[in-house]
């Protein structure tokens, strides 16, 4: 029997009520590792339901909550759950009207973790960094950046045809 490992409900208009039902059902789902609920207008109340789910779901690795208008209040609910849930590796919070108020707390949570973690926070209000990386993710990024592509050997050039020298501004000679 197949088990649901990935669920994409992006742009389905879940709103707060749908988010409540969905996150309650997934709180103890043993096989789900990726959930995409971007662009569902769940707001800060939906983020609160997601936070409850993250406290008990120890299998989810990727959660995309981009473009849900969770705002700073929704992030306030998510932060403690994200700190407790060690299975979650990637959290996408792009375009959620987040400010810089929680940046230091997010940075602290990320600095304390010993696993690969990324929180995307691009396209939010001014002052909110685009991304938070755990030390493991930073090390991997730096290692990747340090790798230089192999240089391509230059192909030998063909010898140029010999040309007779011409003076500038003169017309070529006509054969006689």
Image (tube, grey):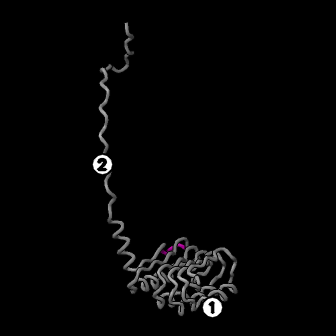
Determine which quarter of the picture holds residue 32: bottom right
Q: 150 or 1, which lies in front? A: 1
Q: Give the residues drawn in magenta, as a range.
A: 124-129
Determine which quarter of the picture holds residue 6: bottom right
User: Crowdedness of circle 1 by 10 Å Cα count: few (<14), some, many (20+)?
Assistant: some
**SS assignment at label 1:** helix
Determine which quarter of the picture holds residue 25: bottom right
Q: Which residue is mark 2?
A: 153
Point 31% across, 43% down: residue: 155
Residue 134: image tag: none
Asked whether 175 falls inside the magenta stretch, the response is no
Q: CA distance from mark 2 to mark 1?
A: 59 Å
- For this orientation, the residue located farthest to the front is 1
Q: 67 or 117, which lies in front? A: 117
Q: Position of residue 33 (x, y in %)?
A: 53, 82
In the displayed structure, would residue 168 be above or below residue 127?
above
Q: Main secondary structure of the magenta part?
A: loop
- The answer to whether 95 appears left or right of 153 in the picture is right
Q: Position of residue 48 (x, y in %)?
A: 60, 89
């Amino acid at each position: 029997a197949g088990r649901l490992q990935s669920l994409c409900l992006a742009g389905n208009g879940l709103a707060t009520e749908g988010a409540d039902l969905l996150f309650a059902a997934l709180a103890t789902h043993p096989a789900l590792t990726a959930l995409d609920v971007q662009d569902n207008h769940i707001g800060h109340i939906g983020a609160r339901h997601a936070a409850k789910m993250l406290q008990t779901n120890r299998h989810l690795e990727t959660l995309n909550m981009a473009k849900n208008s969770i705002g700073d209040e929704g992030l306030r609910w998510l932060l403690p759950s994200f700190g407790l849930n060690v299975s979650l590796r990637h959290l996408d919070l792009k375009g959620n009207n987040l400010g810089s108020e929680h940046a230091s707390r997010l940075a602290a949570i990320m600095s304390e973790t010993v696993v690969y973690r990324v929180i995307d926070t691009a396209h939010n209000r001014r002052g909110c960094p685009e991304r938070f990386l755990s030390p493991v993710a930073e090390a991997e990024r730096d290692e990747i950046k340090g790798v230089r592509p192999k240089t391509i050997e230059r192909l030998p050039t063909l010898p140029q045809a010999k040309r007779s020298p011409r003076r500038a501004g003169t017309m070529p000679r006509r054969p006689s």
